[in-house]
Amino acid sequence: MATYIVLINFTDQGIRDVKQTTERAKVLTAAGQRLGIKVKDIYWTLGAHDAVLVADGPDDEAITAWTLGAGSLGNIRTQTMRAFSADELNKILAKLP
């Protein structure tokens, strides 16, 4: 499983219905489980992003399908980053000349 960081911003629709954000997060988590994705943590944040999510997923395709599906509901926009643990990065670094 790979780790992903998802930066989340509310759309105009999402902020109008912000009182439902934690319920929507439960739905998002369940949708991820159906794709083999495990949400490790969700934090609602101050600053440039409204929330940050950490998830483990089987591959880029599953994460992409999941975040596209979430975005298509109209409440959030996402930016997804692949994250590497120290062990994973050490394997990558070992391949450098």
Image (cartoon, helix red, strand yellow):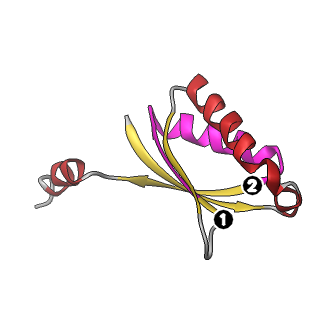
Residue carrying label 2:
76
* Picture residue at 74% right of the left edge, 40% below the top: 23
Inspect the magenta stretch and tell me whether residue 1 lies in it: no
State the CA–CA distance, disc 1 to disc 2: 9 Å
How many other residues sit within 10 Å of disc 1, few (<14), some (14-19) or many (≥20)?
A: some
The disc labelled 2 sits on which kind of residue?
Ile
Q: Which mark is residue 29?
A: none
Write the start and end of the magenta stretch as one range. Answer: 52-75
Q: Sequence-wise, which precedes: disc 1 or disc 2?
A: 1
Q: Is residue 95 left or right of residue 78?
A: left
Q: Are marks 1 and 2 in contact (CB under 8 Å)?
A: yes
Inspect the magenta stretch and tell me whether residue 65 lies in it: yes
Looking at the image, is mark 1 or mark 2 nearer the viewer? 1
Residue carrying label 1:
50
The disc labelled 1 sits on which kind of residue?
Asp
Q: Quadrant of residue 11?
A: bottom right
* Picture residue at 51% right of the left edge, 26% below the top: 36
